[in-house]
Image (cartoon, rainbow, N blue to C red):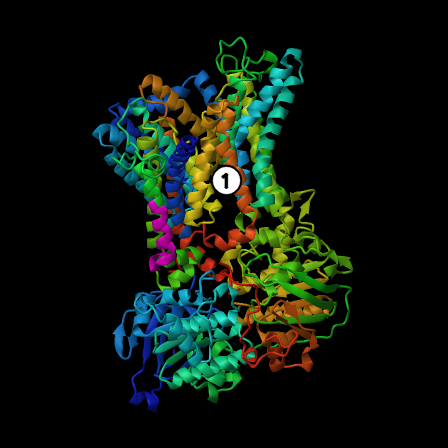
Amino acid sequence: MAWLSPVIAAAAIFVVGFALFSGLGKNPFAAFYVFFVKPVDNLYGAAELLLKASPLMLCAVGLAAGYRANVWNIGAEGQLTLGAVCGGGVALALQDQGGAWLLPAMLAAGVAGGMAWAAIPAWLKTRFNANEILVSLMLVYVAKLALSWLVHGPWRDPEGFNFPQSKMFADVALLPVLVPGTRLNAGFVFALVVVGLLWIFTRRSLVGFQMRVAGLAPAAAAYAGISASRTVWLGMLIGGATAGLAGVGEAAGPIGQLLPSMSPGYGFAAIIVAFVGRLQPLGIVLASLLMSLLYLGGEAAQIGLALPSAITGLFQGLLLFFLLAADVFIDFRLRLRPRSTAARRSRRRPA
Amino acid sequence: MIDHLVTLIALTLAAGTPLVLAGAGELVAERSGVLNLGVEGMMLVGAVIAFIVAATTHSPWLGVAAGILAAAGAALVFAVLTLTLLANQVAAGLALSLFGVGLSAYVGLGYVSVVIEGIKPLAVPGLSDLPFFGKLLFAHSPFVYVSIALIALIQWLLFRTRAGLILRAIGESPDSAHAIGYPVIAIRYAAVLFGGACAGLAGAYLAVAYTPLWTEGMTAGRGWIALALVVFATWKPWRLLAGAYLFGAVTLAQFQAQAMGLAVSSQLLSMLPYLATVVVLTLISRDAATIRLNAPASLGKPYHPDV
Amino acid sequence: MSARQPRAEERSGVARLELSGITKRYPAVIANDGIDLAVMPGEIHAVLGENGAGKSTLMKVIYGVVKPDAGTIRWNSEPVEIANPARARALGIGMVFQHFSLFDTLTVAENIALALERRAAGRGLQARIREVSQRYGLPLDPRRRVHNMSVGERQRVEIVRCLLQQPQLLIMDEPTSVLTPQAVQSLFDTLRQLAAEGCSILYISHKLDEIRALCQRATVLRGGRVTGECEPRRESASSLARMMIGGELPHPRHGEATTRGDGALDVRGLSAPSDDPFGVSLKGIELSLRGGEIVGIAGVSGNGQKELLAALSGECTVASAKAIVLNGENVGRLDAGRRRALGLAFVPEERLGRGAVPEMSLADNALLTAHRQELARRGFIRFAAAHAYARAIIRRFNVKAPGPDASARSLSGGNLQKYIVGREILQGPRVMIAAQPTWGVDVGASAQIRQALIDLRDAGVAVLVVSEELDELFEICDRICVMARGRLSPAKPARETNAEEIGLLMAGSFIGARPAPAELEGEFVDTRPGERP
C-alpha cells in the first residue's frame, strides 16, 4: 500500500508529459519516445542512466536517514559542492605525485568536506536551536559562491584560456570506468554499497531504530533516553557524508575537473527522490532511476524536440507535488479517522 | 557626503522591500499557525508571470496584478494539500518551492532577454526635487511605500482588531478556537492565500520594478531569507521591517565595496547576505524562552479537526 | 435502555433539554447508542459513567461540536438542530470543557471576548467580568494573562466565560479533577446558586461521592448506552457502581511487604527553574523513598509535578548531581537511559507520543525502553527477543491485543496503559515511578494497574505514584505528600491523614506563612514572576 502513491505520482507525470507534448504541438507519442525511451535504448544511454542515478541515490539515502529522524537537511547541494571542492582540491594538489592512494584520499576528503559542511547546521541546531532547514539552505548559496570564487581565482587553470575552470584531473585522479565505451564509473558501485549499508543501519541497528523513534515521537525519544543532540548530529552528518561522496564522485567522474557548477541540482532533486522513494532504500534506488530518466529526457528533448531542458525541473517539481497529493489522498481515506481518535486520546491534559 | 548617505538609504529601502513584502505575508500565515516554506517558489512564480504579462500587455501594473494572482494560486495548492488533505507542512512547502523554481524557469525561458518598460520610482513634481528631503522621502518606488503601509496595516489588524485576535488565537491553539466555534481551516486558508499574494507582489516588484528583467532564479534565495526574518522579528511586523532593511543594507555591501575601491572578490561579498542570515537566525534562536513565548504555539503542526 | 418514569415535577413542567435516541458512531466504536436524557429547569443532573462510556461524546453532541448520526434534541420542548457551538450558545447552552479551550498568551478579558458575540464583547466587558465573577464566588482579574494562572483559576475563567452569556443550561465536564477538596466545595456552592436561579446543570463525572453530594438526578452510561436513571441520594455507592460498571467497584488486595529491596530514591534540596516560560520552578524538594513502600504525591496539576517527574526520570537533567540519589548513586546529571540502567523505571502520564510511539508495533515499543533486557546485541536488534518480551507483557498483564505486531495506537487506553506498566515492571526495576497511572483508563484496567503497583511494592520495590485522584492515593499508598507551587510537603503515613488535611496542604498551608482564607477555597495567590509583554 505504501507504494501506491509513488506509482500514482509517476504515472501522473507520464500523463502530464503526454498532455504537455500535445499542447506544445508535438506528436505526443513521438515526443514521449524521445523523452522517456530513446535516451536509454542503447548501452551508452543505459550507462548514462545509471551514471546520473548514482549521485541522486547517494544524496537521497543520506537525506532519508535524516528525514526519518525529523532532521531536515536541505543543503545536500551545498554539501555535494564542498565534497567536490575538497576531493578536487586533493587531486589538484597531489595528482602530480600519482599513486594508488590518491583516489581513496580524494574520496575520503570529499566525504569529510561534505560532513564538515553539514556539521555547521548540526552544531547551530544543537547548540543554538537554529532551524536547520534555513541554515543548511543558506550554506548552499555560500558553497556555490565559494566554488565560483575558487575556479575564477586561485584554482583557475593557467592554461585554460581564462575560462573559469580548474586544471583537468590526471587519469590517476579519476574513477575507473566500469563499462568500456561508456562513462559509467565505479561511483555507481559505491552508491549501491552505501545504500546497502544504510539499509542495515536503519532497519537492524538499535541506533537506527532510535533515530526513527526521534522522528515519529520526540517526547517518546526523550523518555527513552535517546539524545536529541545525537540524533541531529547523526542525521546531518550522514546526509553530508553521502552528498560529499556524490560530489567528489562527479568531480572524479564525468566532469573530471572543477567547474563553477558541479551539479544540475542533484542535491535538490535528491530531496524529491527521497520522498518519492518513501525514505526506503529500494524505493530510493527506483526513484533515482526515474529522476535520472527525467534528466536524460530533458537533455534529449532539447536536441530532438527543440524543447528547453528546463522542462526537467518542471517535471521534478510536479513529481513531488503529485506524490504528496497521492499520498494524502490515500492516507486521507484510509487513515484519517483512526488517527484523529488517537490524537484525541493522547491530547495533553491541562498543564 | 550627505547626498551619498541619502542614496544609500534609498538603495537600502529598495533592496529590503522584497523581503518586507514576502516576509509580511509569511508572518500572517505563520501567525495563524501555518508554516509555508514555499515562499521562494511563490516569489518566482509571481515574478515570472508578472514579467510575462507586463511584456505581453505592455502594462507593468497589469503584470503586477497577474503576479499576485499567480502566486496566490500556488499558495492555494499548498493550502489544499496541508489544510484540507493534512499533508506534512514542511514537505509540502519544499515541494512548492522546488516546483516554483522549475515552473518559473521553464515558463520564463522565452523572456530572458526581453526588455520591458518597468515601474519607475516616484517622481512627484516639486516634492521629489527638494534637496535632501526630496530624495529621502518622495523619490522611492511605489512598492516601497506600499510595503511600509502593509506593515502598518498588519500591525493594526493583528493587535487592534477582533479579526486579528481571532487569527492569533488560532495560531495559539486551533483546538480551543474550534471548540469555541471559529472556522479554523477557513481562516488559515485566508492567511495562506494572503501570504501567497504578498510573495507574488514581492516577486513582481523584483521583475517589473527593481530590475525590470527576468532571469532564472532571480530571487536568489530572498524567499528563504524572508522566512528567517520572520523568526528574527519574533513574528512582530515592525521588527520585520527593521530586519528587512538591515538585510537590504547587507546586500548593498557588494556595490559599496566596489565604490570604496576594496579589492574583495565579488563572490565573497555576495556571500554576505546568506552568512548574515545564518548569524541572525542563530542569535535569535538561542533564546529558546523568547521563541517559545512569541512563536505561535501551533506553528507547523497539522490540525486534525475532531469530527 | 430503561423506560423513563415521569415524576411529579416533570409532569407539571417542561424539560429544558430532552435527548431522544441520540446515536454517534465512530469507525472503531459506537460512542453513543440510542441515548435518552432529560434535564429539568434548575436541576443539577449528573451523567455518570466510567472512562470510555461515552459521556464526553454526548456533551459534544449537545454543544454542537459533533453531529449525531441519529436522534433528536428538544430545547424547551422545541426540536432543534445544534450545528455548531455558536448555535448552542445562542440557545443558551454553555460548556466548561475538561480540557480547557483557553489561549495561554492572551488575557482573561481577551479570552472571554473571543467566546462572546461581537456586540457583547464591547466596552464594559472588564467591569462585567469583575461583577459576575465576584457574584458567583469566582473572583478574577480581567487583565491577567492566562499562562500566569493556576489550573483552578483557569477553570474559573471558563466558567465566568459561560456565565456572561446567561446560560439556561451549563455543562460541566469532569470539573473537579483540577481542584482541591476545599475548592470543590466552593464550586458546588456556585453551582447550587446557579441552579437556584433557574439554570440547569449537566454534571459529568465518574466520582460517586461528589454526585451523591451535589446532584438531584443522575443518568448512568455504560458502553455508550443508558444503564440507569436514579436519584443519587437515594442510592448507595454499590448500587451506583453496579449501574456504572455492572459490578462492584474493585478494591486492591494489600499483601505484606515481605522483602525490603535495596532500591532507594533520595531527593535532597532539589531546586530547578522550569524550561518552559509558563512552567513552575521546583524549590527545595526533599523526598526519601525506600524499597517495599508506595509513596504518593498528591496535588492538582500545574504545581510542578511535570517538572519534578522530568527531573526524576532524567528527561531533564539538573545542575547538581547530588540532588537526586538513586540506589546510592548521584544521578542528577544522568539522562533517562543511564538512570534506567541503574534500576529506575518510569510510567509517564502521556501514553501515546511519550510512553509509546503510536505508529510502531508493541514489539518495537518494547525496544523503546527495554532494550537492555537482551533485546539488542552489539548494537543490532534481536527481533525474536523483542517479540518474546512483548508477548510476555501481553500475557502477564492481560493486555487485550492481537499480538506483538499490533500498533500501539490500535489499543484502547486501558490496554495500552497496562502494556506500558507491564513493560516497565518486567525490567525488574528497584525504583518505579508512575505518573497518573490510571488517568483515562476504564475501571477494570485501573484496578489491575493499581494491583500491579501493590504487588510490586510487596516484592520489595520502591514505588512513587503521582496522582490527582486522592481516592487512588489513599487506596494504594503507604505515605502521602503534597505538591504545591513547586514545593513538596513532608510525607505522612496515609493512615494518619485524610482528604481535608491533604486539601489544606494542596492550598499551600505548609509553605511559610499561614494561608489566607481565599487560599483555603482553592484560590492561589499569584506569586509568579511578572507578566510577559
Q: Is residue C458 above or below residue A92?
A: below
The reply to whether residue B39 is in sight is yes
Q: Quadrant of residue C431?
A: bottom right
Residue B10 sits inside the magenta stretch: no
Residue at mark 1: A133
Residue A257 position within the rendered picture, expressed as x and y whole percent measured from the top left: 54, 16
Total tally of numbered discs in the picture: 1
| Residue name at image x 66 percent, y 81 percent | C497
Letter of the chain that mark 1 sits on in the rendering: A
| Among the 4 quarters of the image, the one containing residue C323 | bottom right
Indicate the amino acid at tag 1: Ile
Q: Nearer the viewer, residue C68 or A146?
A: A146
Question: Is A301 positioned to the left or the right of C272 in the image?
Answer: left
Number of residues whose C-alpha sits closer than 10 Å to that of mark 1, classed few (under 14), some (14–19) or many (20 or more): many
B64 in relation to C364, above or below: above
| Nearer the observer, C389 or B89 | B89
Q: Is residue B16 above or below residue A159?
A: below
Residue at 46% across, 20% down? A48
Residue A105 locus on image (x, y percent): 65, 21
- Position of C428 with respect to A30 (left or right) is right
Q: Nearer the viewer, residue A151 or B18?
A: B18
Residue C69 rendering spot, x and y as whole percentages: 32, 65
Instruction: Please identify the quadrant where the N terminus of chain A is shown.
Output: top left
Query: At 35% across and 28% down in the image, what residue appears?
Result: B105
With A165 as the anchor, is C288 left or right in this view? right
Residue A77 visible in this rendered orientation of the protein = no
Secondary structure under badge 1? helix
Task: Residue B191 in the image: state x and y as whole percent.
Answer: 35, 50
> Which span is picked out in magenta?
B149-164
Q: Residue at x 52, y 34 (%)?
A: B275
Q: Main secondary structure of the magenta part?
A: helix
The residue sitting at the bottom extreme is C8
